[in-house]
Amino acid sequence: QLQPVESGGGSVQAGGSLRLSCAASGYTYSRHCIGWFRQAPGKDREGVAIINTRSGSVYYSDSVKGRFTISQDNAKNTLYLQMNSLKPEDTATYYCAARQALGGGVYSSPNAYASWGQGTQVTVSS
């Protein structure tokens, strides 16, 4: 059973950086889609950065391209999200989610994921 656990959220001023971590136990690293989603108050949950560990394909939402980087530490079964040049509109609860990869593509819709972490808050002040 997949069980992601997020950490690393916090408060930062605009232009600052944060790194989120997701320790995901119970999954076979080589054949899953695992990534980061976020949900701001009053908004739908959206995919931010997701990787297919089977194919190496990566998805970034347009709003974070060039600022956020997803990476993984195979030995630690840990996923990271490096967030640079943060903006107030990045303020949200960030979730890590994982699912089995059935092919080489990336599932970017939250509806495709059943295993979710508890979330970590990121607040960016102007």
Image (cartoon, helix red, strand yellow):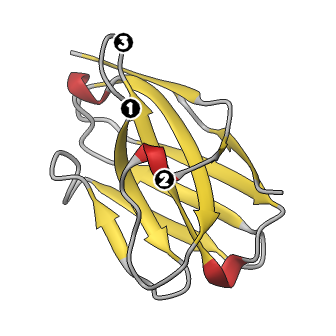
Cα distance, mark 1 to mark 3?
10 Å
Residue 64 against residue 119 in the figure, above or below: below
Label 1 belongs to which residue? Answer: 45
Cα distance, mark 1 to mark 2?
12 Å
Callout in the foreground (1, 2): 2
Quarter of image, res 119: top right
- Residue 85 coordinates in the image, percent (x, y): 24, 42
Q: Residue at x 31, y 11 (%)?
A: 42
- Amino acid identity at mark 2: Ala
Callout in the foreground (1, 3): 1
Dot 3: few (<14), some (14–19), or many (≥20) neighbours within 10 Å?
Answer: few
Dot 2: few (<14), some (14–19), or many (≥20) neighbours within 10 Å?
Answer: few
* Circles 1 and 3 in contact, beta carbons < 8 Å: no
- Residue 62 coordinates in the image, percent (x, y): 15, 52
* Circles 1 and 2 in contact, beta carbons < 8 Å: no
Q: Residue at x 66, y 38 (%)?
A: 7
User: Which residue is outermost to the top?
Assistant: 42
For the C terminus, the image quarter is top left
Q: Can you tell which mark lies on residue 112?
A: 2
For the N terminus, the image quarter is bottom right
**Does residue 29 appear to the left or right of 119 in the view shown?**
right
- Residue 55 coordinates in the image, percent (x, y): 46, 88
Residue 73 against residue 104 in the figure, above or below: above
Dot 1: few (<14), some (14–19), or many (≥20) neighbours within 10 Å?
Answer: some
Under circle 1, the secondary element is: loop
Q: Residue at x 63, y 47 (%)?
A: 114
* Circles 2 and 3 in contact, beta carbons < 8 Å: no
Is tag 2's residue or tag 3's residue first in the polypeptide sequence?
3
- Amino acid identity at mark 1: Arg
Residue 95 against residue 29 in the figure, above or below: above
Label 3 belongs to which residue? Answer: 41
